Amino acid sequence: MDAASNMADGGKAVSTRDAVFEVRGVSKVYHMGEVDVHALRDIDLDLYKGELAVLLGASGSGKSTLLNIIGGLDTPTAGTVTFLDHILTDANDAALTEYRRDHVGFVFQFYNLIPSLTALENVQLITEIAADPMDAADALGLVDLGDRLDHFPAQLSGGEQQRVAIARAVAKQPDVLLCDEPTGALDFKTGKIVLEVIERVNRELGTTTAVITHNASIARMADRVIHIGSGKIVSIEENISKARPEELSW
Protein backbone atom coordinates (compact mmCIF):
# COMPACT_ATOMS: atom_id res chain seq x y z
CA MET A 1 0.00 0.00 0.00
CA ASP A 2 1.18 3.58 -0.62
CA ALA A 3 2.08 5.34 2.63
CA ALA A 4 -0.48 3.27 4.50
CA SER A 5 -3.17 4.32 2.02
CA ASN A 6 -5.35 1.39 3.07
CA MET A 7 -5.75 2.63 6.61
CA ALA A 8 -9.21 2.38 8.10
CA ASP A 9 -11.91 4.74 6.89
CA GLY A 10 -11.84 7.93 8.89
CA GLY A 11 -8.03 8.22 9.01
CA LYS A 12 -7.30 11.69 7.68
CA ALA A 13 -4.11 13.21 6.39
CA VAL A 14 -2.18 15.53 8.65
CA SER A 15 0.90 17.66 8.16
CA THR A 16 4.00 15.74 9.26
CA ARG A 17 6.88 17.88 7.93
CA ASP A 18 9.86 15.52 7.86
CA ALA A 19 8.44 13.23 10.54
CA VAL A 20 7.78 9.59 9.73
CA PHE A 21 5.87 9.32 13.01
CA GLU A 22 4.04 11.86 15.13
CA VAL A 23 2.96 10.67 18.56
CA ARG A 24 0.62 13.04 20.36
CA GLY A 25 -0.80 12.72 23.86
CA VAL A 26 -0.36 8.95 23.96
CA SER A 27 -1.20 7.18 27.18
CA LYS A 28 -1.55 3.48 27.90
CA VAL A 29 -3.31 2.02 30.92
CA TYR A 30 -3.41 -1.70 31.66
CA HIS A 31 -6.24 -2.86 33.91
CA MET A 32 -4.90 -5.56 36.24
CA GLY A 33 -7.91 -6.63 38.28
CA GLU A 34 -8.75 -3.65 40.46
CA VAL A 35 -5.40 -1.97 39.78
CA ASP A 36 -4.67 0.37 36.87
CA VAL A 37 -1.08 0.32 35.63
CA HIS A 38 -0.10 3.47 33.73
CA ALA A 39 2.54 2.30 31.24
CA LEU A 40 2.60 5.57 29.27
CA ARG A 41 1.52 9.04 30.32
CA ASP A 42 0.76 11.73 27.72
CA ILE A 43 3.69 11.03 25.36
CA ASP A 44 4.55 13.50 22.57
CA LEU A 45 7.30 12.38 20.17
CA ASP A 46 8.40 12.66 16.54
CA LEU A 47 10.62 10.15 14.74
CA TYR A 48 12.29 11.50 11.60
CA LYS A 49 13.13 9.97 8.26
CA GLY A 50 16.47 8.19 8.24
CA GLU A 51 17.40 8.88 11.85
CA LEU A 52 18.73 6.39 14.37
CA ALA A 53 17.01 7.05 17.69
CA VAL A 54 17.72 5.26 20.96
CA LEU A 55 14.96 4.97 23.56
CA LEU A 56 16.80 4.75 26.86
CA GLY A 57 15.30 3.83 30.20
CA ALA A 58 15.10 1.28 32.98
CA SER A 59 13.03 -1.87 32.78
CA GLY A 60 9.35 -1.01 33.24
CA SER A 61 9.78 2.60 32.10
CA GLY A 62 7.39 2.18 29.15
CA LYS A 63 9.90 1.83 26.30
CA SER A 64 8.55 -1.42 24.87
CA THR A 65 4.95 -0.28 25.21
CA LEU A 66 5.73 2.84 23.19
CA LEU A 67 7.58 0.83 20.54
CA ASN A 68 4.72 -1.66 20.28
CA ILE A 69 2.22 1.15 19.76
CA ILE A 70 4.38 2.78 17.07
CA GLY A 71 4.76 -0.60 15.40
CA GLY A 72 1.04 -1.33 15.38
CA LEU A 73 1.31 -4.25 17.80
CA ASP A 74 -0.66 -2.44 20.50
CA THR A 75 -3.07 0.48 20.71
CA PRO A 76 -3.03 3.42 23.12
CA THR A 77 -5.70 4.14 25.69
CA ALA A 78 -5.62 7.79 24.61
CA GLY A 79 -3.85 9.94 22.04
CA THR A 80 -2.92 9.56 18.36
CA VAL A 81 -0.07 8.05 16.37
CA THR A 82 0.42 9.26 12.81
CA PHE A 83 2.54 7.38 10.27
CA LEU A 84 3.44 9.56 7.28
CA ASP A 85 0.02 10.98 6.37
CA HIS A 86 -2.36 8.57 8.10
CA ILE A 87 -3.50 8.16 11.67
CA LEU A 88 -2.68 4.65 12.89
CA THR A 89 -4.97 4.99 15.86
CA ASP A 90 -7.93 5.20 13.45
CA ALA A 91 -6.88 2.01 11.64
CA ASN A 92 -8.77 -1.28 11.89
CA ASP A 93 -7.10 -4.65 12.52
CA ALA A 94 -6.74 -5.52 8.83
CA ALA A 95 -5.12 -2.18 8.06
CA LEU A 96 -2.70 -2.51 10.98
CA THR A 97 -1.72 -5.97 9.77
CA GLU A 98 -1.00 -4.55 6.33
CA TYR A 99 0.92 -1.66 7.88
CA ARG A 100 3.14 -4.03 9.88
CA ARG A 101 3.69 -6.28 6.87
CA ASP A 102 4.63 -3.55 4.40
CA HIS A 103 6.21 -0.80 6.47
CA VAL A 104 7.73 -2.08 9.72
CA GLY A 105 10.63 -4.39 10.49
CA PHE A 106 10.88 -5.77 14.02
CA VAL A 107 13.96 -7.06 15.85
CA PHE A 108 13.49 -8.44 19.36
CA GLN A 109 15.83 -9.61 22.12
CA PHE A 110 15.14 -13.23 21.20
CA TYR A 111 15.57 -14.18 17.59
CA ASN A 112 12.33 -16.10 16.91
CA LEU A 113 13.87 -18.09 14.06
CA ILE A 114 12.23 -21.31 12.90
CA PRO A 115 14.68 -24.10 13.85
CA SER A 116 13.80 -26.38 10.93
CA LEU A 117 14.52 -23.70 8.31
CA THR A 118 17.89 -22.48 7.08
CA ALA A 119 18.98 -18.86 7.44
CA LEU A 120 17.93 -18.23 3.84
CA GLU A 121 14.54 -19.90 4.32
CA ASN A 122 13.89 -17.91 7.50
CA VAL A 123 14.39 -14.68 5.55
CA GLN A 124 12.35 -15.96 2.60
CA LEU A 125 9.35 -16.30 4.92
CA ILE A 126 9.21 -12.51 4.80
CA THR A 127 10.28 -11.87 1.21
CA GLU A 128 7.51 -14.14 -0.08
CA ILE A 129 4.78 -11.95 1.46
CA ALA A 130 6.36 -8.46 1.33
CA ALA A 131 5.22 -5.93 -1.26
CA ASP A 132 8.68 -4.87 -2.51
CA PRO A 133 11.31 -7.11 -0.92
CA MET A 134 15.01 -7.30 -1.59
CA ASP A 135 16.50 -10.68 -2.49
CA ALA A 136 16.77 -12.84 0.64
CA ALA A 137 20.40 -13.71 -0.08
CA ASP A 138 21.22 -10.01 -0.53
CA ALA A 139 19.64 -9.25 2.84
CA LEU A 140 21.85 -11.87 4.48
CA GLY A 141 24.84 -10.44 2.64
CA LEU A 142 24.04 -7.04 4.12
CA VAL A 143 24.53 -8.52 7.61
CA ASP A 144 27.70 -10.39 6.55
CA LEU A 145 26.10 -13.83 6.48
CA GLY A 146 26.36 -14.47 2.76
CA ASP A 147 28.39 -17.60 3.49
CA ARG A 148 25.88 -19.01 6.00
CA LEU A 149 22.74 -19.18 3.85
CA ASP A 150 22.25 -22.93 4.23
CA HIS A 151 22.98 -23.12 7.95
CA PHE A 152 20.22 -23.90 10.42
CA PRO A 153 19.79 -21.77 13.58
CA ALA A 154 21.37 -24.50 15.74
CA GLN A 155 24.50 -24.20 13.60
CA LEU A 156 24.76 -20.45 14.19
CA SER A 157 26.02 -18.47 17.18
CA GLY A 158 23.66 -16.19 19.09
CA GLY A 159 25.03 -13.15 17.30
CA GLU A 160 24.63 -14.82 13.92
CA GLN A 161 21.05 -15.76 14.73
CA GLN A 162 20.31 -12.15 15.67
CA ARG A 163 21.85 -11.01 12.38
CA VAL A 164 19.53 -13.43 10.53
CA ALA A 165 16.65 -11.84 12.44
CA ILE A 166 17.84 -8.38 11.31
CA ALA A 167 18.15 -9.59 7.71
CA ARG A 168 14.61 -10.95 7.93
CA ALA A 169 13.37 -7.60 9.24
CA VAL A 170 15.09 -5.46 6.59
CA ALA A 171 14.44 -7.79 3.63
CA LYS A 172 10.98 -6.28 3.22
CA GLN A 173 12.69 -2.86 2.83
CA PRO A 174 10.62 -1.30 5.62
CA ASP A 175 10.23 2.40 6.24
CA VAL A 176 11.08 1.85 9.89
CA LEU A 177 13.12 -0.69 11.86
CA LEU A 178 12.11 -1.17 15.51
CA CYS A 179 14.61 -2.98 17.73
CA ASP A 180 13.70 -4.00 21.29
CA GLU A 181 16.84 -4.78 23.34
CA PRO A 182 18.55 -6.39 20.30
CA THR A 183 21.77 -7.05 22.26
CA GLY A 184 20.10 -8.06 25.53
CA ALA A 185 20.87 -11.77 25.15
CA LEU A 186 24.38 -11.28 23.76
CA ASP A 187 27.83 -10.79 25.23
CA PHE A 188 29.71 -7.52 24.76
CA LYS A 189 31.74 -8.51 21.70
CA THR A 190 28.81 -10.10 19.88
CA GLY A 191 26.50 -7.24 20.85
CA LYS A 192 28.82 -4.73 19.19
CA ILE A 193 28.75 -6.73 15.96
CA VAL A 194 24.94 -6.68 16.01
CA LEU A 195 24.92 -2.92 16.64
CA GLU A 196 27.30 -2.43 13.72
CA VAL A 197 24.79 -4.24 11.51
CA ILE A 198 21.89 -2.09 12.73
CA GLU A 199 23.92 1.08 12.18
CA ARG A 200 24.89 -0.07 8.67
CA VAL A 201 21.27 -0.78 7.75
CA ASN A 202 20.29 2.68 8.97
CA ARG A 203 23.14 4.36 7.10
CA GLU A 204 23.00 2.43 3.82
CA LEU A 205 19.24 1.94 3.45
CA GLY A 206 18.11 5.14 5.15
CA THR A 207 15.64 3.22 7.28
CA THR A 208 14.26 5.17 10.23
CA THR A 209 15.53 3.13 13.16
CA ALA A 210 14.51 3.09 16.83
CA VAL A 211 16.48 0.99 19.30
CA ILE A 212 15.25 0.28 22.82
CA THR A 213 17.90 -0.29 25.46
CA HIS A 214 18.60 0.15 29.15
CA ASN A 215 22.33 0.40 28.34
CA ALA A 216 23.42 4.05 28.37
CA SER A 217 26.59 3.32 26.40
CA ILE A 218 24.62 2.24 23.34
CA ALA A 219 23.00 5.69 23.25
CA ARG A 220 26.28 7.17 21.99
CA MET A 221 25.62 5.74 18.50
CA ALA A 222 22.24 7.49 18.13
CA ASP A 223 21.31 10.68 16.33
CA ARG A 224 18.93 11.36 19.21
CA VAL A 225 18.56 9.84 22.65
CA ILE A 226 15.04 9.74 24.08
CA HIS A 227 15.12 9.23 27.85
CA ILE A 228 11.99 7.55 29.23
CA GLY A 229 11.07 7.12 32.87
CA SER A 230 7.83 6.17 34.64
CA GLY A 231 5.91 6.23 31.36
CA LYS A 232 7.00 9.75 30.41
CA ILE A 233 9.64 11.28 28.16
CA VAL A 234 12.12 12.76 30.61
CA SER A 235 14.37 14.43 28.04
CA ILE A 236 15.53 14.27 24.43
CA GLU A 237 19.11 15.02 23.47
CA GLU A 238 20.90 15.16 20.14
CA ASN A 239 24.33 13.61 19.67
CA ILE A 240 26.45 16.21 17.91
CA SER A 241 29.27 13.70 17.39
CA LYS A 242 27.96 10.15 17.17
CA ALA A 243 30.11 7.18 18.13
CA ARG A 244 30.46 4.27 15.77
CA PRO A 245 29.39 0.93 17.28
CA GLU A 246 32.98 -0.33 17.31
CA GLU A 247 33.86 2.59 19.61
CA LEU A 248 31.30 1.66 22.26
CA SER A 249 32.16 0.13 25.61
CA TRP A 250 29.85 -1.09 28.35
Image (spheres, rainbow, N blue to C red):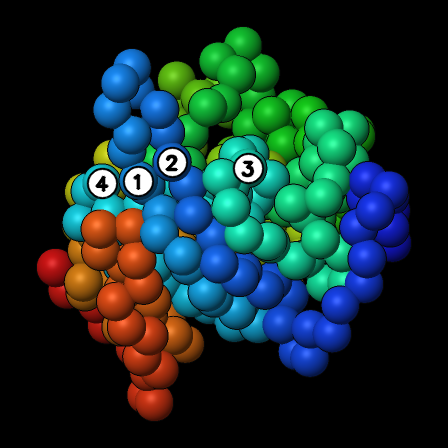
Q: Which amino acid does label 1 sit on?
A: His
Mark closer to the observer (1, 3): 1
Quadrant in the rendering for residue 205: bottom right
Q: Which amino acid does label 2 sit on?
A: Val
Q: What residue type is labelled 4?
A: Gly
Labelled pair 2, 1 in contact (Cβ < 8 Å): yes
Q: Residue furthest top?
A: 116
Question: From mark 4 to mark 3, how far is it between C-alphas?
Answer: 18 Å
Q: How crowded is mark 3: few (under 14 residues within 10 Å), some or many (20 or more)?
A: many
- The reply, left or right, for residue 186 in relation to residue 64 is left
Q: Residue furthest bottom?
A: 240
Q: Is mark 4 on a helix, strand or loop?
A: loop
Q: Which amino acid does label 3 sit on?
A: Thr
Write down the residue under mark 2: 29
Q: Is mark 3 on a helix, strand or loop?
A: loop
| Placement of 183 over or under 161, stated as above or below | below
For the point 60% across and 62% down, the residue is: 21
Mark closer to the observer (4, 1): 1
For the point 28% across and 72% down, the residue is: 235
Write down the residue under mark 4: 60
The answer to which of marks 4 and 1 sits earlier in the sequence is 1
Write down the residue under mark 3: 75
Measured as percent of width and height from the top left, residue 238 is found at 35, 82
- The reply, left or right, for residue 193 in relation to residue 100 is left
Measured as percent of width and height from the top left, residue 107 is found at 47, 40
